[in-house]
Image (spheres, helix red, strand yellow):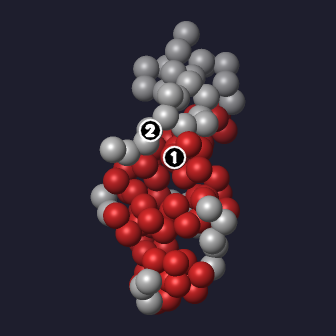
């Protein structure tokens, strides 16, 4: 039997449910701000340090750091690599059962 909002079966591990919840929180947070979304895209593309992201987006390093702090607090994940993986899954529609969530 599938769970209502996730499409996951009751037999899937708790980890899969938690991962899906984290992806959804990340999606919601990213939908609230263009800059956060741009920073997430940089992360997913492999640009991981504040200065590299700042140079790419033409903004101050401290501004990038502030966006990360807000993003991590809002999502509840404080690991750039994990956030990058979750965002890459969302933006490329590689999550099991998804058909893609590209933005128009």
User: What residue is drawn where x is 62% and y is 62%?
Assistant: 45
Residue 10 in sight: yes
Q: Which residue is mark 2?
A: 101
Which picture quadrant has residue 66?
Answer: bottom left
In the rendered image, the vertical position of residue 50 relative to residue 2, given as above or below: below
Depth check: 53 or 16 in front? Answer: 53
User: What residue is drawn where x is 59% and y is 50%?
Assistant: 88
Q: Is residue 13 left or right of residue 65?
A: right
- Which quadrant, please, contains the C terminus? top left
Q: Which residue is mark 1?
A: 91
Residue 8 x, y percent position in the rendering = 57, 23
Depth check: 84 or 23 in front? Answer: 84
In the rendered image, the vertical position of residue 36 relative to residue 62, given as above or below: above
Residue 40 x, y percent position in the rendering = 51, 62
Q: Is residue 25 left or right of residue 47?
A: left
Residue 14 x, y percent position in the rendering = 64, 34
Residue 85 x, y percent position in the rendering = 64, 53
Q: Residues within 10 Å of mark 2 (few under 14, many from 20)?
A: few
Query: What number is the disc on residue 83?
Result: none
């Amino acid at each position: 039997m599938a769970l209502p909002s996730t499409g996951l079966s009751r037999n899937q591990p708790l980890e899969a449910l938690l991962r899906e919840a984290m992806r959804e929180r990340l999606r919601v947070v990213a939908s609230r701000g263009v800059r956060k979304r741009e920073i997430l895209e940089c992360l997913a593309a492999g640009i991981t340090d504040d200065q590299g992201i700042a140079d790419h987006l033409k903004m101050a390093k401290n501004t990038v750091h502030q966006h990360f702090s807000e993003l991590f607090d809002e999502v509840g994940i404080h690991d750039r690599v994990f956030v990058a993986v979750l965002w890459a899954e969302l933006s490329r529609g590689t999550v099991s059962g998804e058909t893609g969530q590209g933005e128009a």
